[in-house]
Every structure is written in C-alpha cells, then in structure tokens.
Image (cartoon, rainbow, N blue to C red):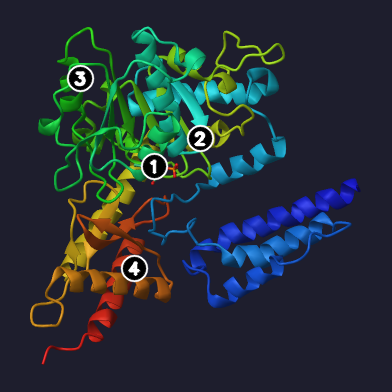
Amino acid sequence: MDRDEDLEALRAAAAMALEYAATVDDRPATPDTAAFAGLGAFDEPLPQAGVPASETLRLLHAAGSPATMASAGARYFGFVIGATLPAALGAAWLTSAWDQNAALPVMSPVAAKLHDVTRGWLLELLGLPAGSAVAYVTGATVANASCLAAARDTLLARLGWDAQADGLFGAPAFDVVIGEGAHSTLLKSLGLVGLGRSRVHVVPADDQGRMRADALPDLAGPVLVCAQAGEVNTGAFDPFDEIADWLAARPHAAPGWLHVDGAFGLWALADPGRRHLVAGLDRADSWATDGHKWLNVTHDCGLAVVRDPAHLRRTFTAAAGYVPAGDTFDPMHHTPQSSQRARQVEVWAALRTLGRAGVAGLVTRACDAAAEIARRLAVGGLTVLNEVVLNQVLVRLDGEPGDTAGGAAEGDALTAALIAEIQADGRIWCGPTRWRGRTAMRVSVSSWKTGPEDAAFAADVILTCAARVRATLVPLP
Ligand SMILES: Cc1ncc(COP(=O)(O)O)c(C=O)c1O
C-alpha cells in the first residue's frame, strides 16, 4: 500500500466520474454494440495477485462507462428512474469517502444530525404529520415492506397478539385491501411480510388505475388498506379522502391502518399546483417513497414514513449489549437493515440546494414536459391513453383508418414495433407496458434536466420512429 499511489488512483477516478457526468447528456440513451462488446473486458479470471487500483479503476471507466444507460441524462424516459442532481452526486462522493455506518448515532454523528434535519424538512415539505418517523432504506419496495411490517405488528398488537415474539402462526386474522392498480412490488412486499400476495381484497380500478372508493368491500373487522399515490403507468392518485372516510366509518373497535405507496407520486405533495391530487394523503398511517426516483438522488434511497415512530421500533428493534436501543432515533432499530449507508446526506444536499421552491419546480417541470410530450404525440396521431396528471404518459400507436392495422392486436404489434424502433434509434429510451390488456408505451419524465426542449426532442424522435413503423405497413389488397 502506497499512500500517494492510492490518492492518485482516487484523483483519477474522480476525474473519470467528472468526465462521465459532464458528457452523459451527449451519450446515446442506449449503449451501442461496441459498448456491449466492450463488456467482454470484464471476462477474466480472478487475478491471483491482484492489480493496482488505478488500473482497475481505468478498466471500469473504459469498459463500464460506455455500457451504461444514460439514465442520468435529460433524455431517458424509461421506467421511473430519476437522474442525479449535482449536489446529490457530490454528496454521494463525500459520503463514500466518509464511509460512515449510519446504523446508530454513536457510529456517525454527522449521519445522525442530517437524519434529524432531513426528517424535519421532509415532513414539512410534504405536509405529513410532524412527529412521524422517517427511515431510510434501499427503495420503495423495502419502504413498503417496512411500513407493512409495522402495520401488521400494530394491528396484531391491538388484537392482543405479539407478532415479533410469536410470529404469524395462529395469529388473529385481519383483512388486507389493495387497489387493482397496485404496483407489482407492493405484492412482493405483502408476501415478504407474511400477509400474502393473493390473500387480499382487490378493489377494482377506474380507467386511470385509481382505486374505486365506491367499490371498497364491506368489511367490519380489522383491516390494512394499501392506497397508491402515482400509478406506475398513468401517474393517477387514489381517492385518499374517500378511502380514509371509509376506514373511519367502520365500527370503532376494529383497528385499521392506511398505508400509501407513493414511490414517485408522493413528491406531488411538494407542488402546490397539484393539491387536488393529494387531498387526504396526510390522513394515512404510513407512506413509502423513493429519493432515487423523483428527488433525483443516487440509487439506492427509499424512505419509509410512519406516523408513530413506536410502530417502527416495535418491529425492527434488534438491541444487544453492544448495540443498545437508546432514546434517540436509532436507524438500525427502525429499519430492516442494521449496517446502512448514510443516504440522508444526499437527501439533505438535494433539499438544501433546491429549497422548497426548487423541489416544487422539479415536479412542475417534469409534469409540464410530460404534458407537452403528450400534446405533441396526440397531434402527431398517436393515442394518448391517460389523463396526464403527473409525469407519466401512456401512448399507443394505432393503425390509421384504411391501413392494415385496424384492430387492437395490430395496434399491439405496431406499438411494440414503435418501441423497438425507438430503442434501436437510441437517442431517447422508452419502454413497454401492458395497459388494460393491451401493449402500450410509457414515457416517464423523472429527471431534473428534462426541460421543454427535451420534451420537444423526445416527441419528435417518437413521431419520426412512428412514421418509419407506419411506412413499413403493407396496405390491404
Ligand atoms: C408505485 C411504485 N411502488 C413501488 C415501486 C418500487 O420501487 P423501488 O424500485 O425503488 O423499490 C415502484 C417502482 O417503480 C413504483 O412505481
């Protein structure tokens, strides 16, 4: 080990990371074939003696950077994958250099302080109850699972059962209610915490994927309801006030818990222009969201927010002589993991740099870009399937009257061909989905960088690709 050599390797790595950050907008959204082929450089036997760090890092940049998706850029519209704010990226670098374990305040005073600061800021920004706990986890899947585990144990405790001591064997039953449009990972989270993926009441959704409050089941017993802020295809919001009213109207003795999966949609709370979507959202008992999606911090950062911190603590305490559960907020006693990265550092940097107005602006800008893309695509002859209330656009390429593609199956094939054409084109990236039994394309605007010019550019690429696909259609004889 040579200190100078180590520092030189780190300087070089920082320069390579800077170069990547500076050029990501100029990269194709999808790596080219040479970049895929270049990944073969990693196919080597585990070195016997090891190689210098500088050489390893050089290989990582040379073969790895070209084979990235440019999801940190302005023109990536796949899944719901946020880019990274410069403040968050810089904070991530510093956090890595610190290498703090944020499990307990005693392990990292700065992590504990910034946890406390971000907790207050986030609750204020999102208008959630001031005393709530905010726990950092890897993503919304684990945030949902954390909240659902706390909900499970709380409901069972109210029914006289200690789930942490005795498990679920022989525990009193309670009902679980989800919407038809619930995210697939919410089912994973339900399965993970022993509540079952199929043992749920599924409430039908309306044409936007919103839970239909008028179709909530007639349940008088204890119940856990999972609502959603931001349907993954349409961006639609469940009617929280009506769901909370339904819960409150049930017999007083029956315990209830309302959880909201807001992996990206929860950030709409920060935008005063979107109040109509989020009415009643603050009446829930727990909320899950992601920092890595719409707040644009690096992966992986999820947040579990629980109204009463004691409910997280009941489920996740893992005290031992050397890791006592103190009076302060101990992350390892409020989350599934013990050792953990100090994710709050990036969240702090993002919030401080953006400010309240900046977070609202981030949301508004993405929603405006989505609306503009939808407008241009509709004018250009594509079918926009959703009301564009947030950052998601759901579109389809249907056949024009008179050509071969009149029916739904042809529309499916055309839409799949459009997606393939866009991905092959490589200037932007959009992915497929199934919506109401049909193939559709999703355009998700989740990057702080995406502005009106990028929206116009994206629409232009999509329409050009659609024209190419249409040009291949053979007219009916
Ligand atoms: C509504 C919803 N819930 C949960 C998730 C899972 O989030 P993560 O991948 O961060 O675990 C997603 C991801 O897109 C989502 O959209």
The residue pinned by badge 4 equals 457
> Residue 474, how many percent across, how many down?
19, 88
The residue pinned by badge 2 equals 347
- Residue in the image at 51% along x and 30% along y: 136
Q: Is 273 in front, or is 29?
A: 29
The residue pinned by badge 3 equals 247
| Label 1 near ligand 1 (CB < 8 Å) | yes
Instruction: Report how far apart the C-alphas of labels 2 and 1 lie in the structure.
Output: 23 Å
Does residue 274 lie above or below 322 as drawn? below
> Residue 321, how many percent across, how many down?
70, 11
Between disc 4 and disc 3, the foreground one is: 3
Label located before the other in sequence (3 or 2): 3
Q: Is 413 in front, or is 21?
A: 413
> From this viewpoint, is residue 263 visible?
no
Instruction: Report how far apart the C-alphas of labels 3 and 2 lie in the structure.
Output: 33 Å
Mark 2 neighbour density, 10 Å: few (under 14) some (14–19) many (20 or more): many
> Residue 11, how many percent across, how many down?
76, 53
Q: Quadrant of the C terminus?
A: bottom left
The residue pinned by badge 1 equals 185
